[in-house]
Image: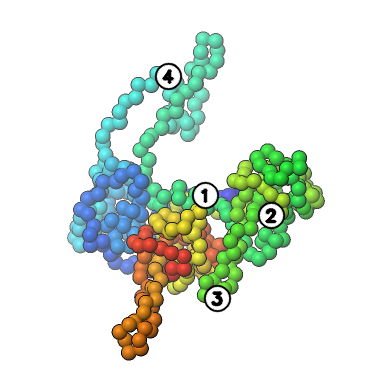
Amino acid sequence: MAFRILSGLLLSLFISTHAYADELQINPSHPDQYTVVHGDTLWDISGKFLQHPTQWPELWRFNSQIHNPHLIYPGDTIYFAMVNGRPQLSLSRNEQPTAELNIQSPCVLKEEEFKHGRTKFPVSADGKLMPCIRESNLNQAIKLIPNDKIDQFLTTPRVVGANGLNASPYVLELAGEHLVAGIGDKIYVRAITAPKNSTFTVYRTGQTYKNPETGEILGYEAQFVAETTLQQAGDPATLVVTKAKSEIRMGDRVMPNLEEDITLNYFPRPPAKKINGNIISIQGGVSQIGLYDTVVIDKGIRDGLQVGHELDILRKGRMVMDRFGPIKNSMVKLPDEKAGILMVFRPFERVSYALVMKAGQAIHILDKVQTP
């Protein structure tokens, strides 16, 4: 697929466009100091000092020492204090020396050389280039969110409308009379006669997403099967498989690769309008919903959701029997209770993929989501 990467978004732009002038709400159980460890995210750390981690831009903006919170490393210690009625953070860098490695190689490729290139390399006595060892910095700055948890969902699967898959070309036959096809195999696809691009993705029909309250169909999941390159247009057309997650079957649908925007820098914040929705599915082949799981909610672009929008998760109150009221054994619904927070990272027209950023208790399908 072809994608445009949207990174390096300006924090100042976010602050100026985000009407978030509420007074900072400090976490009453905040620590006076915290030492960053591997696996921490900026969201995690902000939550240690704030009741609402989405206020992190304001918190970091108040301090003068931490110029860029994206350049905080494991081992650094953050100190919290109130100065003239304002919260202030200070930073102590981890200055422990890195152990020297005894590298027995005539060629060590530095990180800067790997990025910008190198022109001179050692040559052996017989005139052959000698192998180099790449030197990498093991200390990586912390991320705002754990990107590795959502990478697999940034491009696939897709959510399409009623005719999105049914009207698409389909795999008619596999070369060599195979029952299934894999990487390097040819497939024959109906009706790709005037293609606008040369790469196509093979999909298989997945879940049907419905509004749990009305039963209205919101979209259909197109599960990723493989990537292909067009070898010859026609009816049928000939495509070659270049990447496969599973075997291609006859009848699988084929759609052209679309250029989509992928956001790498996320700025969690509440939506500008009131959103009330439900968790309708969970991705990743798991049955229990917990921290950093990807879920599907029944609200999307049409409802005003954008990348980075944060919603509270409310655990649906269960029904209990009242044995002591005037009407014996009547059923009473317990109140919904906040169970966590999620962040939308890939909105579609009527549904969205979202990452569970905080889970205070068990989360289930059909739990509610709403604007904080």
Residue 15, quarter of picture: bottom left
Of mark 3 and mark 1, the one earlier in the sequence is 1
Circle 1: residue type:
Gln
Residue 33 image position (x, y, % from top left): 22, 50
Residue underneath mark 3: 214
- Label 4 CA crowd tier, 10 Å (few <14, some 14–19, many 20+): few
Circle 2: residue type:
Arg
Mark number displayed over residue 253 = 2
Q: Distance between the residues labelled 3 and 2?
A: 29 Å
Q: Distance between the residues labelled 3 and 4?
A: 67 Å
Of mark 1 and mark 2, the one earlier in the sequence is 1
In the figure, is residue 106 to the left or right of 31?
A: right
Determine contact: label 3, label 4, CB under 8 Å. Answer: no
- Give the residue drawn at x 40%, y 52%: 145
Q: Which of 101 and 244 is in front in this view?
A: 244
Q: How far apart are marks 2 and 4 (CA)?
A: 51 Å
In the figure, is residue 329 to the left or right of 119?
A: left
- SS under mark 3: loop
Determine contact: label 2, label 4, CB under 8 Å. Answer: no
Q: Which mark is in front, 3 or 1? A: 3
Residue underneath mark 4: 105
Mark number displayed over residue 152 = 1
